Image (tube, rainbow, N blue to C red):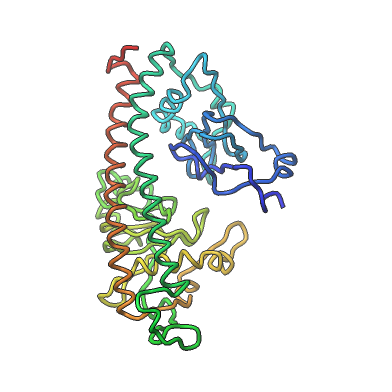
Amino acid sequence: MYYEGGTIPWVNTNEVNFCNIYDTNRKITEEGLNHSAAKYIPANSIIVAMYGVTAGKSAIAKIPLTTNQACCNLIIDESQADYRYVYYFLLQQSENLNRLANGGAQQNLNAFIIKKYKITLPVLPIQQKIASILSAYDSLIENNTKRIRMLEQMAENLYKEWFVRFRFPGHEHTEFVDGLPKGWKVLKIKDCYRTCSGGTPSREKPEYYINGSIPWVKTGEIQDSIIIDTEEKITSEALKHSSAKLLPRNSLLMAMYGVNIGKLGILTKQMSCNQAACAFLPNNEKKTFYYLFFYLKSIREYLLIIGFGAAQQNLSQSIINNIRITIPSEIILNDFERNIFVLYKQIELLQRQSALLARQRDLLLPRLMSGKLEVKA
């Protein structure tokens, strides 16, 4: 009741991931705001995630918004500090903040720890200069992100036009049988794809992670887009001694449980994944993963309904394999794949450009913050 029809932006910690927040996945109502501990924070406040998978990460609220209880919100005194400088300082300190987190099943910070955390502030003009240099990189990344969203929307619109409204090329002359174009089929996932899950190599074996070169996808990285790289890498020894598998390029991943349940990602190169992801592999040489990607995305509400579990929703390979999927004619399917491939190659290029910009920014960050790279106001 506090969410239905709500218009007040409400952030949860999964959205706090070193970014500017212009909108939120969920909204709450005025009643929800009045009957909870949620409070408005002004634009240009800094949000720090205190626990969960993003513990220690921060974001800038670019609009007035509210947050859940797992966020520590810093309202900046602009006469003392540039909010952007504070954000970049916390970005540099994120690993230290993460180490300060405590807890068993999941890491935790608290507001007291964050409030006591010391921040070095040069004079305001120097802060502003440093923040301007670093934010120039983030502005370019943000522009790329907007272009990516536009391309993704174009791809989704094409899917809906062809396979929801049935306005695919030649639809005017197509005969329909039982509500589907003639020649189209309804099959189970297992009739079209092989599925498997991954694994987590033992954390007690540092040789499974140190100097690893094999990208290892965690479900938090599956965000309804392509995946060009991962936060962690594993070694070939880790592959040999765990249930992790080397998955081919263009494999499709779906998060089976956790906060990202039902979300999807397409691998741009060989990678591995943890056990919370289901990988879809072709039964034959036809690799129609873009269609599968959009089909599964279109039935996400259904997937969440059939998920089960007490503390959290869960999908399983058995459930996934028995999902029914509409398979278009080969000509239409191949035509769709070619069109989407062009859009997603542009998305991949933009993602790689953004990754390079982020690396360049991160190389500058410690030098600017430490004063090794002199800045004049």
User: 142 or 315: nearer the eye?
Assistant: 142
Q: Position of residue 52 (x, y in %)?
A: 52, 43
Taking 114 as reference, is 202 above or below it?
below
Q: Position of residue 217 (x, y in %)?
A: 36, 53
Question: Residue 125 lies in what quarter of the image?
Answer: top left
Residue at image coords 60%, 42%: 10
Taking 199 as reference, is 147 above or below it?
above
User: 265 or 57: nearer the eye?
Assistant: 265
Residue at image coords 35%, 75%: 169
Taking 370 as reference, is 312 above or below it?
below
The quarter of the picture where the C terminus appears is top left
Q: Position of residue 1 (x, y in %)?
A: 72, 53
Q: Position of residue 350 (x, y in %)?
A: 30, 47
Q: How many labels sit on residues?
A: 0
Residue at image coords 33%, 70%: 336
User: 174 or 56: nearer the eye?
Assistant: 174
Taking 375 as reference, is 182 above or below it?
below
